[in-house]
Image (cartoon, rainbow, N blue to C red):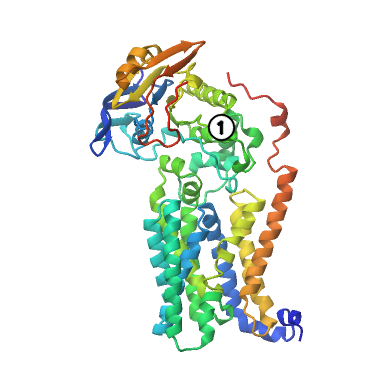
Amino acid sequence: MSIWHRIFDFSDYSALLPLVQNSLIAGIVLGVLCGLISTFVMMRDLPFAVHGISELSFAGASAALLGGVSVVLGSIGGSLIAAAIIGVLGIRARERNSVIGVLMPFGLGLGVLFLSLYNGRSGNKFGLLLGQVVAVDTVHLGYIIWTAAIVIVALAVLWRPLTFASTDPEAAAARGVPVRLLSPVFMLLLGVTVAVSIPVVGALLILSIVCTPAAAAMRITASPAVVPLLSVVFATISTTGGILLSLGADGLPPTPYITTISFAIYAICRTAGAVRARRGWARRRDVAVTAPVPDLG
Amino acid sequence: MTDPILELRDAALGYGNRTLWSHLNLSVGPGEFLAVLGANGSGKTSLLQTILGLQRLTSGEVLVGGQPARRGSELIGYVPQQRRIDPQTPLRARDVVGQGIDGHRWGIGRPSRARRAQLDAALASVGASAYADLPVGVLSGGEQQRIRMAQALAADPQLLLCDEALLSLDLNHQAAVTALVDRRRRTAGTAIVFVSHEINPILPYVDRVLYLAGGRFRIGTVEEVMTSETLSALYGMQVEVLHSHGRIVVAGIPDVHVHSHDHDEVSLS
């Protein structure tokens, strides 16, 4: 069997589809959740923080695996600790990056230790790092749905002040937005989002649905309403598309499909944005080109 | 005389055992243009922070519209220091202005015809209608500063605070931005507090100057404050103030390195 045929195989597809029903629901919910949070991750310049949180979350999840308790709860624990540390110690960008740089290898190292001590199925070991979408059980799906509901409602409430504080903290503070409070609150929301996503997409690959979708959307639009919408669409296409494509391919995990679709979308958006910029995204309406500076005394 | 919009009573501000200024009494009325000048680290920006309710005075009172200063006062518009907006910021110029109207409110917000009309008016008032729908990150520094001005004015404030609003703008844009500020106070009676390290761009419009230096201050008209005697007394050393062709050149000010953010030397030329 050729490699290509191993990667794309759709025989017995209708028989396989019901098996991944849970995964597909998880994929859609995570697509919506991560697509939304991704908008703020990009606006606040936090991709590196996501990486830092996910490594500690991985440590928590592997500790839970070793201890025989729920992996999702372990993952949430680790990620909340990371989010709290980054939120409290890393107010300024430079400090934040160094805190994350220190936490990341520590978390990864702990995770490797716990996994090495663990004697269970080896599939679980790599699953935490690289994702195991097919293994979403009903309990885990419940966590995902509840977390998504809470985080999405919180984001909806915080939407305008969080946008203001993320794009112009000084003006926002002057207008009475609690800028300093919003920072750790957002970290908390980001932390639980990362935590429930990790057992599905993996600690190392989480950025493909928490960073890439909004990064792609921001290449082709600057509308604050369209960016989150596109971001949600991109993230959901990546997760569900990845699950569906991997279904037929025996033994191959969905993660590479998810990351590749996500990357392809980014590449397309980046190209489209570059073409548009060359044609003059920045072109003013005709009045501006001809009219002099309007009467300024 | 009408009630002052901004009032400071025996105000003092300091950090630790260092006093930036004290016994400051100041009252700014509707339509008045007050320039706040002085060395870096003399407490110009801190003064704005106390008016915004973001910082407490060591002693004394700040009143805005007769009430003690508080965070998020609807009476105040604020234009922060000029700096480039990130090119990837997912906001159009009109969205930035919209933040001045309801960016601080909870929830997602709904578009409405009234809000759109208010936005269009704010954009037109600063001459930014032509680039209202462009991403704010692709605009020039001068255009971005007009957008910030529109944001600060969108909620119709009675007091406009500008913190080094002209920094790194070329002369044309400096003139355009200061003319906008002047027109606003003439048409709407908005009081202006304009923090700057350069007086010349705003010289035609300034009613009074608050000059902060060396823990001291002086309030008065340009003619009263911008003299060799006054500035020499403030700095405690010989400073020359030259008037030439409608410009003021100050020579002999010591370099101040305390709390300096953007400029290592004080330039008033």
Identify residue type, mark 1.
Answer: Arg
Mark 1, residue position = B146
Where in the figure is residue A174, as x and y percent of width and height?
A: 41, 39
Q: Give B107 or A260, whichever is nearer the viewer.
A: A260
Question: How many numbered marks, from 0 up?
Answer: 1
Mark 1, secondary structure of its residue: helix
Where in the figure is residue A261, as x and y percent of width and height?
A: 67, 67
Left or right of B18 on screen, residue B100: right
Rendered position, B93 above or below B20: below
Label 1 neighbour load within 10 Å: few <14, some 14-19, many 20+: many
* Residue A70 is at least partly visible in this image: no
Q: Give A115 or A30, whichever is nearer the viewer.
A: A115
Rendered position, A71 above or below A274: below
Kindly identify the residue that appears in the image at 38 percent across and 22 percent down.
B253
Where in the figure is residue A138, as x and y percent of width and height?
A: 51, 81
Q: Quadrant of residue B49?
A: top left
Q: Which quadrant, please, contains the N terminus of chain B? A: top left
Rendered position, A129 above or below B30: below
The chain under label 1 reads B
Kindly identify the residue that appears in the image at 69 percent across and 86 percent down.
A15
* Residue A211 is at least partly visible in this image: yes
Rendered position, A274 above or below A198: above
Q: Quadrant of residue B133?
A: top right
Where in the figure is residue A259, as x and y percent of width and height?
A: 63, 69
Left or right of A147 on screen, residue B47: left
